[in-house]
Amino acid sequence: MPASPEIHGILAYPVTPFTDDDRVDTDKLAALTDRLVTDGAHGIVPLGSTGESAYLTEAEFDAVVDTTIAVVDRRVPVIVGASDLTTANTIRRARFAERAGADAVMVLPISYWKLSEREIAQHYATVGAAIGIPIMVYNNPATSGIDMQPELLVQMFNDIDNVTMVKESTGDLTRMLRIAELSDGRLPFYNGNNPLVLKAFNAGAKGWCTAAPNLRPQPCLDLYEAIRAGDAARAEKVYEQMRPLLEFIVAGGLPTTIKAGLDLLGRGVGVPRLPLLPLDDDGREKLRALLG
């Protein structure tokens, strides 16, 4: 089994910036990623849902991987989202990420056809056999249409050497508790649902995968440090201050709301790629108020 890097804490999703003529803007991506690291993120997770990976060509995917890993320069772990509709192209992406220097890959089981548990397990086993770095299994039925139960997640952890961690994004706390129970606490899980973050950390989540540091890095760090220090009152206070923003960015779609927020903060990175649309005027005003 490949040794997992120390992956914990605030794992920040960069958005993928685009130019006015709809090309990936690697200069702005580099600046955004460097800011996330400098601001204190404990890891960088490019090319997930927030990074609009589903809307990128393979050349664009590769450019984002190369740019991100070069800028991070081993300061923190990089977990590259390598998901695709086919097992073959998921392997291509995962191998590219590994060669580029990624510490791990995150894989969501995307498929036009709803996959059986046997097919899901085979997908991960095939990807795992093709690479030598850890896999973070990403469960997000809201975007993938596939919901992996805790029993399956723990089974794959036991059966596939590369499967070493799970990102759980359903917003169901009982899933995390069940993962811990079934694995006797051996399978690290990470929260991918922003409004659930406080409960997830209290349930033992090792980290929080989030786009929020693009807009408000310090409160994210403050929450994590309060949890680590066992300061429940401080953690609750920070969470309650963050909660309206966390709920807004999720409800409005992360690429759309984060890009609008960066623009409002004077760090514009372009608009989302079609079919996604920029945040409307009413949404921008609400977000402006939340950002203070």
Image: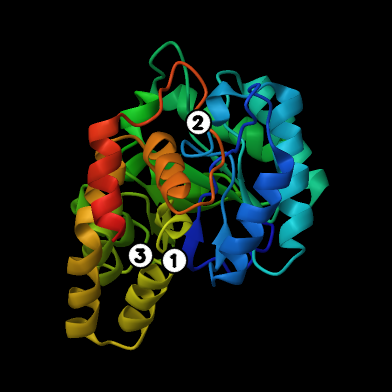
79 left or right of 150?
Answer: right
Numbered badge on residue 271: 2
The amino acid on which the numbered mark 1 sits, given as a three-letter code, is Pro
Question: Does residue 110 show up?
Answer: yes
x, y percentage for residue 162?
A: 62, 49
Question: Does residue 131 show up?
Answer: no
Write the residue at 73% across / 45% down: 27
In the depicted structure, whether residue 198 falls above or below residue 23: below
x, y percentage for residue 105?
A: 62, 46
Q: Residue 244's image quarter?
A: bottom left
In the depicted structure, whether residue 269 falls above or below residue 245: above
Residue hosting label 1: 217
> Which is closer to the viewer, label 1 or label 3?
1
Write the residue at 54% across / 51% down: 267
**Nearest to N terminus: mark 1 or mark 3:** 3
Q: Residue 224's image quarter?
A: bottom left
The amino acid on which the numbered mark 2 sits, given as a three-letter code, is Val
Quadrant location, the N terminus:
bottom right
The amino acid on which the numbered mark 3 sits, given as a three-letter code, is Ala
Whole-number angstrom distance, CA of label 3 to CA of label 2: 32 Å
